[in-house]
Image (cartoon, rainbow, N blue to C red):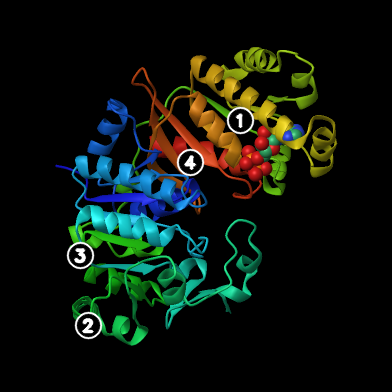
Amino acid sequence: MGIRLGCIADDFTGATDLANNLVRAGMRVVQLIDVPSDGDRIAEQQARDADAVVIALKSRTVPAADAVDASLRALAWLTSMGAEQIYFKYCSTFDSTPVGNIGPVAEALMDALDTDFTLATPAFPDNGRTVFKGHLFVGDVLLSDSGMRHHPLTPMTDSNLVSVLGAQTRRPVGLIDHTVVAAGADAIRARIEELRAAGTGIAVVDAVSNDDLVRLGEAVAGLPVVTAGSGLAIGLPANWGFKPSAAAARLPAPGGHQAIVSGSVSVATNGQVREFLRTGRPAFSVDPLRIAAGEDVAGEALAFAEGHLADGPVLIYSTESPDTVRTVQGELGAAEAGELVEQTLARVARGLVERGVRQLVVAGGETSGAVVQALGITGLRIGPQIDPGVPWCAATLSDGETLHITLKSGNFGGPDFFSAALALLDEEAS
Ligand code: ADP
């Protein structure tokens, strides 16, 4: 049997959000990093063992034509794996430029699937994103009065999603407002038929509560494509009979050594590194200036780790206070320093796995990207959440072995995140 839901997300963290929501609603989910290349048997096998697949693209801020191209490649792969419904996931603040990318991608998916209607709702009430009368609210304020007004890449100055989307598409954009959504799935379906008959191609849908999203989810069973933030995910799995269950997040049993690689310089991670040092566990500090001077810092870190891995988790970190980081950046340049550290930590991660690490915590978004690439990971089966938004994942290595990995971006997690993460895996295993 093929996958039920095939999802295309316009960035990595958004893909993880969506994946988490689907897992919580009872689906077994695999998140893929970009569209698998031809003949990626590992990704195909992972997808076959899942109910939903989320392909993470980096298409939010690229030119619209590139976003369309990547999304269509993702669509083709998902369709080839049997996806019955397509979910185009964008940010819950509807991040896009006036010339794209949400409208053009939605239209291209509709054309490719030969369908004349879809909906759009970034609503995610649990995160304070609600849509009312087509206007998007962030917490208690309109989108256009929120910090998004000043976003460097995608400033959002209009809260009226019907007009924002209308400017991005050729198709007429309409609204399914809250009175209809509150009346239930039948009323929503009736309104969809009305709009469709009147030639509306995309309908913005109001939702101010999870109940609204559940009703909407039921109403859109069978639509070939839906477009939304990650909120709608709470309402879709039930259409295939999925119910929340711990089994959806179950991963293979963990094994091997434990390690933490941290290249994040965020405040939360600084606290987590301090806490780990306080417990007296072995830790090795990676100094960018020594890397820049040509010293084999990765080799030293691995030699250090080798002596300690058998006794429990080892931390390799470049995490420093903002002041120290600024000094280093002043000396090397911020981009240069970042690149040196990322490449070093990526080599360290690969060396750790070669030395038998099978439970790996990675801190830092950019750092995670470099590590995942160095390990050749293209897919992650989503497991239990350590903290809201941060799951354990299982990756299949090129030799077929399983690596448990968690990718913690910047400011997530409490001070004891590292030990809490590893403890959670131990618990799952017992
Ligand atoms: P976060 O956003 O949580 O800080 P990221 O990994 O996304 O984590 O980004 C941190 C960036 O800072 C990376 O490019 C990393 O290589 C770089 N970096 C890490 N440690 C240092 C350091 N000690 N000095 C300068 N740059 C660093």
The mark that comes first in sequence, 1 or 2, is 2
Rendered-image quarter of ligand 1: top right
SS category of the residue bearing label 2? helix
Q: Residues within 10 Å of mark 4 (few under 14, many from 20)?
A: some
The mark that comes first in sequence, 2 or 3, is 2
Image position of 161 with respect to 113: above or below: below
Q: Kindly identify which residue carries mark 1.
A: 261
Quarter of the view holding residue 243: bottom left
Indicate which disc residue 187 carries.
Answer: 2
Q: Amino acid at mark 2?
A: Ala
Residue farthest toward the front in the current orientation of the protein: 170
Viewport quadrant of the C terminus: top left
Residue 291 placement (x, y as % from top left): 74, 20
Q: Kindly identify which residue carries mark 4.
A: 424
The mark that comes first in sequence, 4 or 1, is 1
Image position of 299 with respect to 331: above or below: above
Q: Kindly identify which residue carries mark 3.
A: 221
